[in-house]
């Protein structure tokens, strides 16, 4: 049978994974990319081109390397845990070099345009990997007076670096990861930065207990089980208590009305430092702008504002798929957030249209593994009716849990969603079997971080290196930080526990001695 031809739209993080999965499944991928390089969002460009994603120069990813790699290709052990965008690109280039192929009946006509010439090509399947951070949400209609504001205002996608903002008074609107990162960076040299938020936010930090990356501590199967057993309320209580023990969110003006797991997480180790230093002042939503000032919803006014940055996120859009994938209020109706349910043949899938409480890359890779198998007919999708029921249920659950906001329409929980997709392919790790036959590995799989290698232990496209990758993941986390040899490496926690235990040990020792003194006292005989 002739090899099926698949169009992969976009050569970013999801597109590269999709190409790899096509090759693994003996499909023939052709990748279409609007820019002149791979990497998508992660390729830093000095200038912001229309319809292309755009990042700031300092952007450092907030998910760690062991959690965000392709499932059969660990990130080199000397790469830092949280990578600068240039380092992320380095990893993608390694991957690209490995994929040297890079280059109805359910078939698709893809019209491509290059140098103003159009060409029509026919494909058996399409993987849409164009991302959802290209169409900026600039809600100017919600900010009366902005049209008469004399200062500079723009969306965060146009922000590149802090030099030109020296000595300015700046308002950053929105407390997603862009807003928090940009406010912190600008506040180093600006005269004053105001961070305006309508809901507030819980702030997570990259450096977690004992200095391990947050996601490696957070996303474990053990924690997932605990969360399932405990109620949502108990889990939220515990996590919020933990975050408040670092800094009290109410004292810092950040405390939201909603619970921690009801919002896409904002991760910033630096934000509290900049708030306590007065460099960033947290404010409520802006009610109105005047020519030079901002009036906030609490009635306070900040005069002499030079710049307003709208870090207000992105809209979901598929301009090149027109009526095929409809977006209403930033919502889409896709089975498992991937497949349009009403196609005659399941030969189109959207990859990476998720906003996880977790990590995009391994999820997108798993989606591609599933989609390519569906294209080949190795996995079947349920009936349209069942897909629609699933879609409605997902929307209902999301609406119940999350704060009402256009940015909370494609939320997924990392392990839950990975397992959901893995079950379709038959690659979800079998813990019972592992505990019986390989307890050492089972221990790591259950109590350790849920790294992508777990989905290569069994089933189609099993990887022989997966076991070793899991057993050595902690070494790779620690390796990049071992840049100064520590002689007589001491474990401070054991010192602390010894110090804590000293009085107890003393009491036990004293009791034992007294007992023996009593037993052997000459007068006792
Ligand atoms: P985002 O997560 O969608 O956050 C947008 C923010 O703007 C939210 O605080 C939202 O508030 C607010 N907002 C939206 N519309 C508003 C309005 N009309 N009035 C007032 N406030 C409004 O967008 P983002 O921060 O650009 O992040 C986009 C994605 O990139 C996310 O997945 C994020 O995790 C990721 N990212 C990652 C990094 C990193 O890895 N270092 C850095 C930046 C971004 P509500 O919550 O009230 O709607």
Image: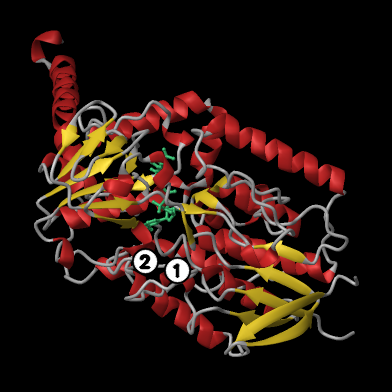
Q: Nearer the viewer, residue 343 or 443?
A: 343
Q: From what the image shows, is residue 408 above or below residue 87?
A: above
- Residue 303 location (% of width, % of height): 14, 40
Q: Position of residue 361 (x, y in %)?
A: 52, 63
Spatial CA span between label 2 and label 1: 7 Å
Q: Quadrant of the N terminus?
A: bottom right
- Residue 16 lies, with reference to residue 444, above or below; the image says below
Residue that appears at 82% across and 55% down? 381
Any part of residue 63 in sight:
yes
Closer to the chain start, of discs 2 and 1, is 1
Residue 116: quarter of image: bottom right
In the rendered view, tell whether residue 415 sits above or below residue 11.
Answer: above
Tell me whether circle 2 and circle 1 mark residues in contact (CB < 8 Å). yes
Q: Which mark is residue 27?
A: none
Which of the 4 image quarters holds residue 424?
A: bottom right
Q: Position of residue 374 (x, y in %)?
A: 79, 64
Q: Which mark is residue 41?
A: 1
Q: Which mark is residue 55?
A: 2
Q: Residue at x 85, y 67 (%)?
A: 377
Q: Is mark 2 within 8 Å of ligand 1?
A: yes
On whether ligand 1 comes within 8 Å of the CB at mark 1, the answer is no
**Numbered disc 2: secondary structure:** loop
Q: Nearer the viewer, residue 310 or 494?
A: 310
Q: Residues within 10 Å of mark 2 (few under 14, many from 20)?
A: many
Q: In x, y percent, where is residue 146?
A: 31, 46
Residue 458 shows in this picture: no
- Residue at image position (49%, 56%) is 359
């Amino acid at each position: 049978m002739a090899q099926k031809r698949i169009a992969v739209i976009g050569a970013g993080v999801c597109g590269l994974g999709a190409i790899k999965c096509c090759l693994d499944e003996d499909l023939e991928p052709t990748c279409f990319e609007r820019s002149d390089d791979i990497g998508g969002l992660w390729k830093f460009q000095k200038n912001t081109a229309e319809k292309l994603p755009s990042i700031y120069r300092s952007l450092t990813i907030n998910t760690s390397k062991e959690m965000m790699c392709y499932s059969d290709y660990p990130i080199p052990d000397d790469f830092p845990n949280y990578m600068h965008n240039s380092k992320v690109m380095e990893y993608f280039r390694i991957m690209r070099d490995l994929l040297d192929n890079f280059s109805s009946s359910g078939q698709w006509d893809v019209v491509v345009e290059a140098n103003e010439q159009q060409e029509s090509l026919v494909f058996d399947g399409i993987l849409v990997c164009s991302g959802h951070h290209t169409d900026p949400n600039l809600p100017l209609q919600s900010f009366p007076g902005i049209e008469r504001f004399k200062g500079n205002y723009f969306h965060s996608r146009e922000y590149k670096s802090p030099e030109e903002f020296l000595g300015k008074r700046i308002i950053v609107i929105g407390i997603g990861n862009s807003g928090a990162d940009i406010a912190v960076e600008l506040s180093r040299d600006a005269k004053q930065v105001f961070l305006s938020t309508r809901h507030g936010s819980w702030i997570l930090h990259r450096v977690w207990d004992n200095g391990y990356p947050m996601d490696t501590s957070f996303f474990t199967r053990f924690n997932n089980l605990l969360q399932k057993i405990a109620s949502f309320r108990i889990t939220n209580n515990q996590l919020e208590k933990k975050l408040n023990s670092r800094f009290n969110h109410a004292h810092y003006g950040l405390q939201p009305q909603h619970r921690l797991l009801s919002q896409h997480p904002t991760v910033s180790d630096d934000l509290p430092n900049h708030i306590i230093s007065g460099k960033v002042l947290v404010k409520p939503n802006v009610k109105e702008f005047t020519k030079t000032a901002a009036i906030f919803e609490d009635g306070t006014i900040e005069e002499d504002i030079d710049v307003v940055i709208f870090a207000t996120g992105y809209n979901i859009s598929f301009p090149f798929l027109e009526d095929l994938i409809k977006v209403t209020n930033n919502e889409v109706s896709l089975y498992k957030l991937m497949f349009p349910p009403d196609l005659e043949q399941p030969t189109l899938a959207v990859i990476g249209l998720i906003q996880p409480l977790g990590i995009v890359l391994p999820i997108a890779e798993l989606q591609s593994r599933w989609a390519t198998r569906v294209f080949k007919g190795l996995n079947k999708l349920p009936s349209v009716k069942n897909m629609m029921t699933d879609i409605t249920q997902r929307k209902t659950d999301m609406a119940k849990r999350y704060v009402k906001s256009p940015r909370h329409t494609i939320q997924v929980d990392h392990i839950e969603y990975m397992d959901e997709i893995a079950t379709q392919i038959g690659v979800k790790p079998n813990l019972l079997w592992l505990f019986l036959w390989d307890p050492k590995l089972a221990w790591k799989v259950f109590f350790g971080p849920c790294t992508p290698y777990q989905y290569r232990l069994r089933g189609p496209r099993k990887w022989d290196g997966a076991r070793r990758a899991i057993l050595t993941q902690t070494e790779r986390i620690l390796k990049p930080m071992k840049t100064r040899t520590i002689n007589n490496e001491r474990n401070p926690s054991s010192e602390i526990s010894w110090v804590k235990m000293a009085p107890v040990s003393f009491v036990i020792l004293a009791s034992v001695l007294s007992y023996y003194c009593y037993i052997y006292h000459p007068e006792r005989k």
